[in-house]
């Protein structure tokens, strides 16, 4: 009876692990998205506040708001760049895996063609005077 339930337990355990992995990934994606939205809102409010303080008497507050908004924009750009870089890394990994998997098959398929070309070159180089 234990032998017949063993694969079922393994299947359930793998489903639970994959489900937990999926939930963790979704929460990370959701966190990044919320963080980007929050940064965008803060940048907009800081720019609006800076525009309100743009008078000679409150220039210091205006400059401070502008500096904070610029820092937040850099943080948002870095977050986006990290996302793009991680996506590019994933694409590169998939392409590298595909190359590794197809290279031996392509090499074995191309080997007879290379031999045939080499044979034709040798036949063309052979002249009747060499008989």
Image (cartoon, rainbow, N blue to C red):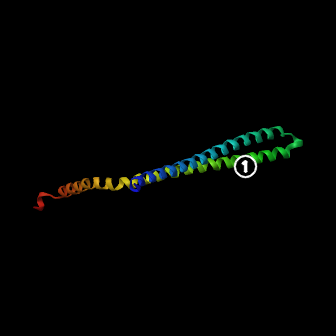
Q: Residue 38, relative to residue 122: is it above or below?
A: above
Image x and y of residue 6, in percent? 42, 55
**Does 117 sit left or right of 77 as displayed?**
left
For the residue pair 55 and 107, the one nearer the viewer reads as 107
* Outermost residue toward the front in this view: 1
Q: Quadrant of residue 124?
A: bottom left
Q: Please give left or right for residue 86 compared with residue 50 in the image.
A: left
The N terminus sits in image quarter:
bottom left
Q: Which residue is at 47% across, 50% downward?
A: 12
Q: Residue 49: x and y, percent?
A: 80, 40
Q: Helix, strand, or loop for circle 1? A: helix
**Which residue is most to the right?**
57
Look at 35% across and 55% down and name the residue there: 103
Q: Which of 96 and 22 is in front in this view?
A: 22
Can you say which quadrant of the picture contains the C terminus? bottom left
Which x, y percent locates residue 99?
40, 53
* Residue occupying the far bottom of the picture: 130
Residue 39, given in percent of the width and then of the height, sits at 70, 44
């Amino acid at each position: 009876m234990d032998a017949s339930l063993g694969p079922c337990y393994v299947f359930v355990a793998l489903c639970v692990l994959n489900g937990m992995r999926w939930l963790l990934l979704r929460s990370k994606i959701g966190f990044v998205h919320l963080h980007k939205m929050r940064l965008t809102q803060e940048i907009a409010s800081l720019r609006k506040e800076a525009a309100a303080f743009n008078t000679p008497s409150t220039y210091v507050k205006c400059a401070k708001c502008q500096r904070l908004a610029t820092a937040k924009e850099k943080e948002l750009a870095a977050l986006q760049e990290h996302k793009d870089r991680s996506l590019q890394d994933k694409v590169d990994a998939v392409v590298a895996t595909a190359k590794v998997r197809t290279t031996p098959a392509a090499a074995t398929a191309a080997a007879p063609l290379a031999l045939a070309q080499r044979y034709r070159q040798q036949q063309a180089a052979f002249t009747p005077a060499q008989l």
